[in-house]
Amino acid sequence: DVYNLGQIKSILHGILGIELVPEICDKGLIESNRCLQPEYFQQFGNIFFELFTNGKTLPGEASSGKDHCLDSAEESNDESSRDNSNDDDYKHSQALEGARKHGDIYETCKSFKRLEITEVEYTLRQKLLPTPICILVTDLIQATRGTSNDAFETLGDLSLELKQMMESPDVYLTEESVGEHKLQFRDDLLCGRMDELDRLMQVAALAQVESRAFLSSVVLVRGEPGAGKSHLVQNMKHPLTKNGWLYINCNFDRFSQSQALVTISSAFEDFFRSLVELKTSIENRDHAEDGDEFLFTMLASIEDNLEVPGIVVLSQFIPSFRSLYPNIFQRVVVEELSESDCEQDDWDNANILDSSKSSSIDCIDDDCDDDDAFIDANIFQNRLQYLFQKLLRAISNPESPLFFFLDDLQWADCSSLRLLSSLVMGQDTDDNPMCVCFVGSYRSSEANINQSLVECIQSFEDSNAVLLTSISLDGLAKEGTCAMISSALKLPARLVRNLADVVHMKTLGNPLFVRTLLASMVDDQSLSYSFMTRRWMWDSKAIKLAPLPENIAIILTQKLRRMPREVQEALSIAACFGLVVDKECLKILSESSEFGGLLPHLDYAAQSGIVADHGSNYVFTHDLVQKAAYDLIPEESLDKTH
């Protein structure tokens, strides 16, 4: 019989629920951090072997660690070359050939002629047990054979490995099919940043209380490129939304400063577009469901707070308002909002929508020669800021607070930064406080380049109405680097510790550098998956001696240049749109003969991990990747490409 995942987890749960004390220890309970003799671990291995083989007797050669050198199928089937003295080995190899036919265990590969495997490991693999379990039991049983860098030393080591498997069974207790063994870093796994995540969760929890005191909660996360700022904050989304929070994500990129308010408006549009989809789903249903009332309550609150003129103005920045409030816009079209009505409501819609006024959204120059234009632009921005303040008050409350994440603030345009500042500082101007936790991230090495950002941060620090929390991300500790590699290779931390030490030394624990370096090692085959041992293999000494490029950009550029030429061109075109690329735009572009085939080439890039396919968008895995793709465009072709 073979075990399924549930049975394996049940056994591990039972093991973790008892006191692990070897029989031969007569001194009572052993401290978890005390080094033990190999004989102790061998006894644990014997117990685990019986548990995972339904009480099967341990093979006689197990304690001596004798290896069976099994012939390939072609050799083992040659009966004329077999004598009676090797009859056991022949039967063993025949059984192994039967196991090889099971695609989840072995891949038939003619280039491999021989396979070394212990009797213990062979017996465990017959149960189709996951590789980490097979390695764990085998290493425990063979603990007396000698020492190695990944040998067990304390009970804490053993307990940690068991807990690691239990806490992430989808990583360590499942086997992938043949051909699917790719280096994979899980976006939902946060390694080495739990203290910072806890601080963020605490601030978010306090934001619900602080809003009643008209205080704004702001968290600023800073660090070098690739330190994992975005990854840290984005790991807040699932636990918060699960507990009733709303979530808005705004990603600035290197093109944002030339387009005032476009990025922050797009973030609001993405949020309200999801409400349009929910509203459409409700209208197409013939019955009510939980959550329907929440949507209509929010829409009513927006209408009460903004009123018709305010909704009309913000629809220029949030087009989904037209779908959420069709009656309002039908009335606007029919009545054409006469100028007298607009003046009565103190909203000159005609002037606001005039192109000359729209251009005033751009950053205001204090040295502007045209005093009237400067005054008009100021008035427009003040009105716009006031409307966004009322919008946040309408959609957030202590029962459903809002988490507003603004990523890469070093690239934010000054109008967006002024809007952010007004939203944060506007908390104490109304009897109806907004319940929002503002979180911004920026590169510590580039913050001073954006003077507007410097002034914005300074205003938060100086304000008594802002509770500011600063989080600085450096490189991961060795344990964090080890956890990242352990998850990616689906091997317990004990087995990858020597590799993690080398990678940490070369990358200083920068998460993006770690990912990129491992990917480059796979490309040059210094890190590869062995179908025979069913695990990733590497040569730490060779990796340690290998030269590391001066910076991560060089590694990324080298990776891109190894892609097919058509894929490189498609990535360069996509990079012109920024970090997030709308598929609909690319489909329109693909209709021309000059840009045909964009989507298939980007799908290829997605399979290679250069971009991520998020349904309606392609998203570059990091802005440094986007920059590397953009830099592939020859300088003389930049204007034409744009």
Image: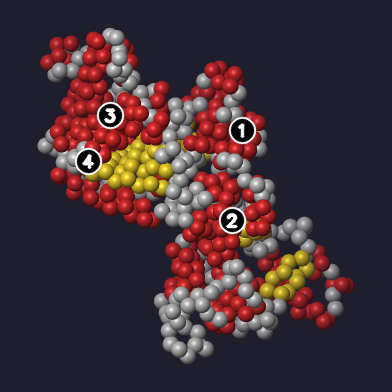
Tell me the element at label 3.
helix
Judging by the rendered image, the residue that carries numbered circle 4 is 466
**Distance from label 1 to label 2 (Cα)?**
32 Å
Amino acid type at mark 1: Val
Q: Contact (CB < 8 A) between labels 3 and 1?
A: no
- The mark lying in front, picked from 3 and 4, is 4
User: Which numbered disc, 1 or 4, marks the residue that appears first in the sequence?
Assistant: 4
**Distance from label 3 to label 1 (Cα)?**
39 Å
Q: Position of residue 61 (x, y in %)?
A: 68, 82
Judging by the rendered image, the residue that carries numbered circle 1 is 567
Report which quarter residue 607 is drawn in: top right
**Distance from label 3 to label 2 (Cα)?**
46 Å
The residue that appears at 65% across and 78% down in the rendered structure is: 145
Tell me the element at label 1.
helix
Question: Where's the N terminus, which quadrant?
Answer: bottom right
**Distance from label 3 to label 4 (Cα)?**
15 Å
Judging by the rendered image, the residue that carries numbered circle 3 is 419
The residue that appears at 52% across and 80% down in the rendered structure is: 36
Amino acid type at mark 2: Val
Judging by the rendered image, the residue that carries numbered circle 2 is 502
Q: As displayed, is residue 61 above or below residue 361?
A: below
Tell me the element at label 2.
helix
Q: Where is residue 289 in the image (x, y as percent from the top left)?
A: 26, 46
